[in-house]
Image: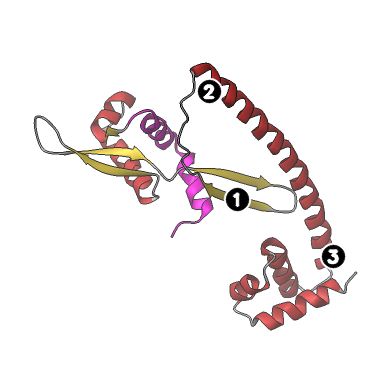
Amino acid sequence: MYDDWDFLSIFSNKTRRDILKSLCDASSYALNISRQMRISSQAVNKQIDILESMGIISPVNMQSRIGPARKVYEPGGFSTIIIDYSRSFMGIKRMELTEIAGDKKTVDEMLSELKSVNNEINEMDKKRAALVSVKDSIIKSLKEKSSMMGEFHRNIINTYIETMDAKVTASYYGLPEAMVRKLINEFKNIG
């Protein structure tokens, strides 16, 4: 199973990004992608295998008028990815996108709506960045407090701070949840 960081690695390769961009414009078969991008079919097939294994594209057999069915690739697994990188923590969150049926609108209405949606997203991004700064400050202060503990206890507390879940933290370290909760309560009393 892949985690969100693995998913992010898909986009580190320019060929994979170009294949995805091409498939978002129109479904296609590997040889056609190879011709359009002017790279070897082996290079395209290698990247297609990776994209398919990650669930980002999927093959569909299309009947051909002159021969056997062709394997055509279509994009899928659409999502939005948020990455936080701060002094005190790193995080990634991938959220699946749902398809919304388009209303019958004029081009002008759709352009106006797109502009409005983009403005709304930009405002949300600014608010999110401000909240992440507050989160960073809080985590930094908590980690300073946890530095007074021994290394093993500090690691447990820092994992709890990251997950905010005693059960997950206990499972990560193979400890009883009650022990982790006791350590969290001791940490709360540091003041």
From the top left corner, tell me how far across and down residue 106 is, in percent.
49, 19
From the top left corner, tell me how far across and down residue 128 is, in percent.
72, 42
Element under disc 3: helix
Q: Earlier in the sequence, mark 2 or mark 1?
A: 1
- As for residue 149 lying within the magenta part, the answer is no
The residue that appears at 75% across and 49% down in the rendered structure is: 87
Q: Nearer the viewer, mark 1 or mark 3?
A: 1
Element under disc 1: strand
The residue that appears at 69% across and 38% down in the rendered structure is: 124
Circle 1 packing at 10 Å, graded few (<14), some (14-19), many (20+), is few
Horizontal placement of 158 versus 28: left or right?
right
Horizontal placement of 130 versus 98: left or right?
right
Task: Inspect the image, locate mark 3, and give the three-letter code of the amino acid beneath it.
Answer: Lys
From the top left corner, tell me how far across and down residue 86 is, in percent.
72, 47
Q: Which residue is mark 3?
A: 145
**Extreme residue in the top direction:** 108
Q: Earlier in the sequence, mark 1 or mark 3?
A: 1
Magenta-drawn segment: 1-26
Tell me how far mark 2 sits from mark 3, CA to CA.
Answer: 52 Å
Q: Which residue is mark 2?
A: 110
The residue that appears at 49% across and 23% down in the rendered structure is: 105
The image shows residue 114, relative to residue 154, as above or below, that is above
The residue that appears at 64% across and 52% down in the rendered structure is: 91
The image shows residue 122, relative to residue 130, as above or below, that is above
**Which colour assignment does the render follow?**
secondary structure
Q: Which mark is residue 173?
A: none
Circle 3 packing at 10 Å, graded few (<14), some (14-19), many (20+), is some
Q: Which mark is residue 92?
A: 1
Q: Nearer the viewer, mark 2 or mark 1?
A: 2
Q: Quadrant location of residue 185?
A: bottom right
Labels 2 and 3 touching (C-beta < 8 A): no
Quarter of the image for the C terminus: give it. Answer: bottom right
